Amino acid sequence: MKLEKIWNLIVGELNNTLKNRWVILYSLSYFLVGEGLTQFSLLGVSNLGLEAVGRIMATLINVILYLTSILSLILGGLSIISEKESGILEWLCSEPISKSEIIISKFIGLLISISTATILGFGLIGWFLAIYFPLNDMIKYVMLIPATVIFSTTCIAIGMLISVISRNKLEAFGLVFILWITMIFIYDLVLMGLTISLDLNEQLVFAFTVLNPFETSRILMMYIIDPTLTFLGSTGIYTARDLGSGLFFILIIILILYAIIALLLATFIFIKRDII
């Protein structure tokens, strides 16, 4: 009976998320961006620097990171607090199912939903890119899919942590936005300032960089495209040289650890706090 209720929660979250128009737009945006970048490349617009498939995918990676992070954080950030405000959470907690199972069920439902939308979005671009680019480059492109799903997993877990600690949806939105802006823009500026002022070496720069899940995912995806990490300058070259092929697995482990820690914290707070 309990397994059936957990399954129903997962399916319910899956249905609600897939019906969300933003999830549909998320998938379509992948195709629009990928198709646009490819057309620029084929037209030979050299001043845009998009003539090589590597540069197309490098630009696509930035778009992927922006879209995936904001959507995953928002959906995770609203997952608990929205049901609290609607009264559904109170009903769920009265059922023979633990709070930890509620968290896990909603997390799995969101992960399946966003992963499905991600795979669909990559597929829409993939068939188009396959017309023009060689198999070796398409293999790299396909490898971006699991990397994006792992990044989405981390963002969903962080979003759910925000949802649990928030008092209302407005606060959850605010915290999500502040975190997103920090990960995307502010963190890089602060790190750049520290690097210049303190003359940090490559090892420390890399260590501080991977403290940000966004940058960890960027390095992972860039590594898939170019294992030498020349796109990332001297820090990237150092990292690729010293860690070699092990870097790929280190980055994945770091992202998974972020997701586990955030989900455990969300579960602990959800259990301890009376948020009904």
Image (tube, rainbow, N blue to C red):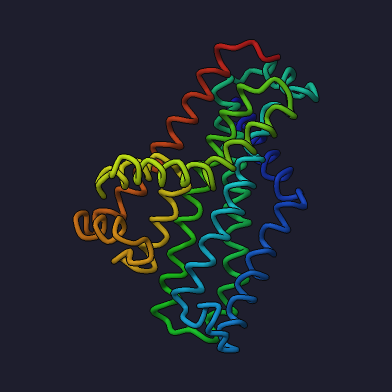
Q: Residue at position x 48%, y 30% from top?
A: 262
Q: Considering depth in this image, is 112 or 56 the residue closer to the camera? A: 56
Q: Is residue 273 left or right of residue 244?
A: right
Q: Is residue 51 left or right of residue 246?
A: right
Q: Position of residue 233 (x, y in %)?
A: 34, 62
Q: For the C terminus, which image quadrant?
A: top right
Q: Position of residue 36 (x, y in %)?
A: 64, 76
Tell me which corner region of the image, top left, top right, bottom left or bottom right, holds residue 230: bottom left
Using the image, determine if residue 177 lies above or below residue 238: above
Farthest residue to the right: give it.
Answer: 86
Using the image, determine if residue 93 lies above or below residue 217: above
Q: Position of residue 86 (x, y in %)?
A: 80, 25
Tell me which corner region of the image, top left, top right, bottom left or bottom right, holds residue 147: bottom left
Q: For the N terminus, which image quadrant?
A: top right
Farthest residue to the left: give it.
Answer: 242
Q: Is residue 265 left or right of residue 27?
A: left
Farthest residue to the front: give it.
Answer: 197
Q: Residue at position x 60%, y 89% from top?
A: 43
Numbered label tally:
0
Q: Residue at position x 54%, y 47% from top?
A: 185
Q: Position of residue 32 (x, y in %)?
A: 67, 70
Q: Considering depth in this image, is 202 or 194 the residue closer to the camera? A: 194
Using the image, determine if residue 56 lies above or below residue 131: above
Using the image, determine if residue 135 lies above or below residue 250: below
Farthest residue to the bottom: give it.
Answer: 43
Q: Residue at position x 70%, y 22% from top?
A: 92
